[in-house]
Structures are given as C-alpha cells and as structure tokens.
Image (cartoon, rainbow, N blue to C red):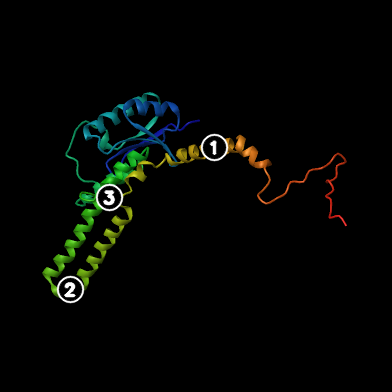
Amino acid sequence: MPTRSIIITSEFSGSVVAKGATDDLSAQLLRHAGFQQIDDWHGRRHRLPTTTPLADKVAITTHATEMLRAARYEVDLPPSLNTARMSPPGHPLGPYAAGAELLKITDRIRAAENGADLQQAVDHLLHPEHGALERVREALEAAGEQINDLDEETYALADRFGFASEFVSSAQSELIDSEAELRRVGTAPEVHTAARTLLDHRGTALATSPAAAKAKVSPAPGSESVQLNATGHPPRTSGPRR
C-alpha cells in the first residue's frame, strides 16, 4: 500500500521539495502541477528549482496540494507556501547572504541530471574570474593585507590569512581545466564499451584473415621442415662412401 502522506518543505537553498510521493498517482499529480521528478540513490522526490520565482512557488505548490488532497492524500505544507499573500523574502541564513548563495549552488550540483548540467553548476565555483573560489581567495588575501595595515604587530595573524588564501589557490590549480571532463561524466562508460567492442572485432578479423592463417602454418625462421616417406618414417640420408 503506497504512502498517503506527502510532505512539502522549503529548503534553505530556496528550492521546494516534496517527499513521500512513492506511488505513480501522487508523482503524476506533482509533475502535472509543475514539480520536477528526481530518482537517484536518495529515492524518488519532486522539487522546484531555486530559480523559481516565489509567486510561482506558491502557485505551483498550492495547486499540487489541492490535487493531492482531492485524491485523498495527506499533505503537510508550510504556511509560507500555503497563502497567496506575498511578503518580501529574506535570506534563509539571515545576514550570511554569501552562504545562502553557495547553498543554491550546492542544490544545483545535487540536482544535475547529466555531465553538462553538472559542469554548468560547478562553473559558479571554479570560474577563474567570477567563481566563488576566486572570490573567497581574494577576500582572504584582502583580510591579511588589511590586518597588516591596521596593526603591523599582528603579522602572524595576517600570515595565517595569507596561507589560507594560498590553500584556496592550490584548490583552484587542482581543478583547473576540468570543464571537459565534467561534461563527459556519465558518458565515459559507453565510450569505453564501444572502444572495447571495436578492438574485439578488429582482433577477430585479424585472427581469421588469410595472412594470419598463413602465419600459423609457416615454419619459424631457422627451423627445418621434416617430410615423411611412404612408410611414415623420415627419409634416409646417404652418408659418405667409404
């Protein structure tokens, strides 16, 4: 008996997630309302992307809830998604807006359905000029410089921020030029299988070719072929006359 309880929550990242829709009917209703279905090792769930405007989130979630309840499902819905009255949204992490933006990137990474989606999400971290890692490296470097400017006696603390900046730079160097590899994620096994199949076919063709058959029966260089006479014995060789 499929579960009859659906829980819809608003995540810190800004996405809306519906859990508990393990049967086909509830999943179909959520998709019809506008949710995207995800099936992975976490199980089946449905979500609205973080980029969905708040008004659309409320409208889609309300519509999905009405259909699910009409089909006799129990729906647990937070008040923020259960009203058409709109209020300016605040950052989910309060004053830590940068952390909230990184949560959105993490959500996009986890929701990637192929290598191309994954590469586009990770690019927000690794872009050499505008990526999050470059901004973190720059901020740590600036903090170390500012500490020195404010108090030269705290050079040890300034050095710690400088070292941290270098660690981030090392992480950037480790992941540089990874875009093409990220885009191939999920497709490499098929390429490798095709390559092995091609090699197998070539190996079979070479093994059955006339040249290969001739090579099998030809004597090795330096070896002598021995012919048998009619009696099945090697022919006699005449020695020197006495």
What's the amino acid at mark 3?
Leu
Among numbered discs 2 and 3, the one appearing first in the sequence:
3
Pointer 1: what residue? 202
Among numbered discs 1 and 3, the one appearing first in the sequence:
3
Label 2 element class: helix
Q: Which of marks 2 and 3 is in front?
A: 3
Pointer 2: what residue? 154
Image quarter of residue 241: bottom right
What's the amino acid at mark 2?
Thr
Label 3 element class: helix
What's the amino acid at mark 1?
Arg
Q: Which residue is drawn at 45% across and 30% down?
A: 23
Residue 8: give x, y in percent of width and height. 34, 36
Tag 2–tag 3 contact (CB < 8 Å): no
Q: In the image, which disc is placed on residue 126?
A: 3
What's the CA distance linking mark 2 and mark 3?
Answer: 32 Å
Q: How crowded is mark 1: few (under 14 residues within 10 Å), some or many (20 or more)?
A: few
**Residue 140 or residue 240, whichever sits in front:** 240
Among numbered discs 1 and 2, the one appearing first in the sequence:
2
Residue 172: give x, y in percent of width and height. 29, 55
**Residue 225 or residue 81, whichever sits in front:** 225
Image quarter of residue 161: bottom left
Label 1 element class: helix
Q: Which of marks 1 and 3 is in front?
A: 1
Q: In the image, which disc is placed on residue 228?
A: none
